[in-house]
Image (cartoon, helix red, strand yellow):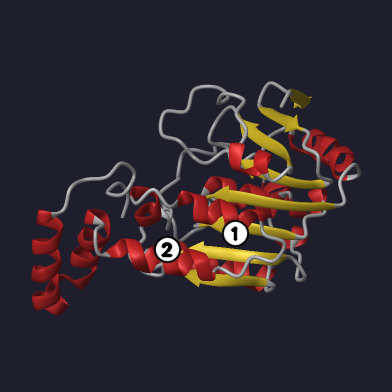
Amino acid sequence: MTAEVVFDGERLRAVLWRGRSDRLVVTFDYRMDGREGFSADNHSTGFARQGFSQLSIKTRANDWFVNAETPALEEALGRVRAEHRRVQALGFSMGGYGALRFARALGAAQVVVVSPQVSPEAEWDVRYRGETPGWDEGLGDLRPRAMPTLGGLLVFDPFVAEDLTHARAILRLFPGLRPIRLGFGGHPAIRTLRGAGKMWVVQQEAGARRASGEAIRAAHRGARAESKGWWTRLAGRAGAGHRALASRARDVAARLPERAGDLDGP
């Protein structure tokens, strides 16, 4: 597949790969510590095998895609949208916010968003303070961009307090999303799946015509027993209130090997 740059700004970038289908899957950059510039132009071989066209939305900084170029990007997305019969989107954390923020401009029928924020400036969440100086609430506010009919999945770990509060706020604006709770999955909530090499399940749901979330739930349940991160997060949550459970969880975690992407975060 050949990359086609459909928006090339100083702060935002959008790259399109055309498939044989008139269905488009849109992905968004996730937040990265120490991000320096745009990520490489890569597409998903899994989506390509299914014939989907793919659009990758990138940002030079962890700014949640909200900056002076946002309105111009929206115009470009409108032109891409007009060329496709159905649009679906996938995003993790900051990328999940992006999928919701641009869902209306994309005319998205469905999104799969994992541990998204309703805003990086939410008063209950200090994790991202200082990353969005000069935040433009007019451009970043999801309330005027709410889509009650938007379908899809909102995947999150209900034991990450900030993410639970974000999820509740998002569901008030996008009530058509189905909440998928992955207990002790961390942030983002698919850490247990990622450690088990099961991220393809999330991608499969994102490409489905009607995502149910059942495959994600089942894969998470199946991966928990061998996940050091899952047992570590369970132990931390159980704490002094459930000492026997916390002790058992710590013992199990100590016997398990570390897996990339499973232990970081909450």
Choose the circle earlier in sequence order: 1 or 2. Answer: 1
Residue 201 visible, this angle: yes
Look at mark 1 in the image and give the residue it sits on: 205
Look at mark 2 in the image and give the residue it sits on: 219
Give the secondary structure at mark 1: helix
Image coords of residue 183 (percent x, y): 36, 69
Res. 28 image quadrant: top right
Q: Is residue 126 left or right of residue 93?
A: left
The correct choice, above or below, for 48 with respect to 208 in the image is: above
Give the secondary structure at mark 2: helix
Amino acid carrying label 1: it is Glu
Q: Residue at x 41, y 34 (%)?
A: 33
Classify 10 Å Cα crowding around label 2: few (below 14), some (14-19), many (20 and above): some
Q: Which label number is shown at residue 87?
A: none
Viewer-proximal residue, 63 or 233?
233
Amino acid carrying label 2: it is Ala
